[in-house]
Image (cartoon, rainbow, N blue to C red):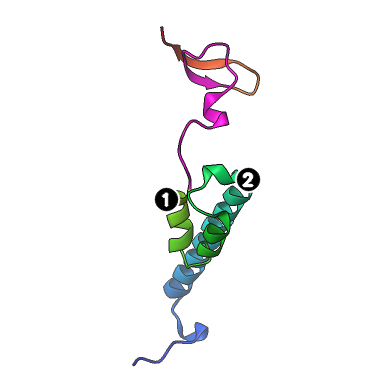
Amino acid sequence: MARKKKWSELSGGQRFGVVVGAVIQIALQAAALRDLKKRPADQVNGPKIAWVLGSFVNTIGPIAYFLFGRKYGQSAASRGTGDSASSAGLKTSMGVNIGKRIG
């Protein structure tokens, strides 16, 4: 079995790769934990605590949560509070519709 290298034995490119990987891992986990905190339990597939614990499994945990842990349906944000249910666009924070009307 090969001996593990110390940080001082890594090349500049290898150190950069480790740092980038760590930043990606931390960002994914923070995003997953933030989403879990804000998302109601009925919009999560399975128990929220299981997904919180699963998010600590390297990079795979947060990615699995975003792929399989969230229920995708018509959320409050996508329903909006528009004037018409037939609008097919976005509504800005000022209430201006962006997009085209259907029907």
Contact (Cβ within 8 Å) of mark 2 with mark 1: no
What residue occupies the far top of the structure in this picture? 103
Q: CA distance from mark 2 to mark 1?
A: 17 Å
Q: Is residue 64 left or right of residue 49?
A: left
Q: Is residue 38 above or below residue 98?
A: below
Where residue 9 sits in the image (x, y, percent)?
A: 46, 86
Which residue is label 2 attached to? 38
Q: Tell me the quarter of the image containing the N terminus.
A: bottom left
Which residue is label 1 attached to? 68
Q: Is residue 1 left or right of residue 33?
A: left
Where residue 27 sits in the image (x, y, percent)?
A: 55, 57
Decide which of tag 2 and tag 1 comes sooner along the chain: 2
Give the image quarter of residue 10.
bottom left
Q: Is residue 51 above or below residue 44?
A: below
Q: Is residue 19 above or below residue 8?
A: above
Region rendered in magenta: 70-91
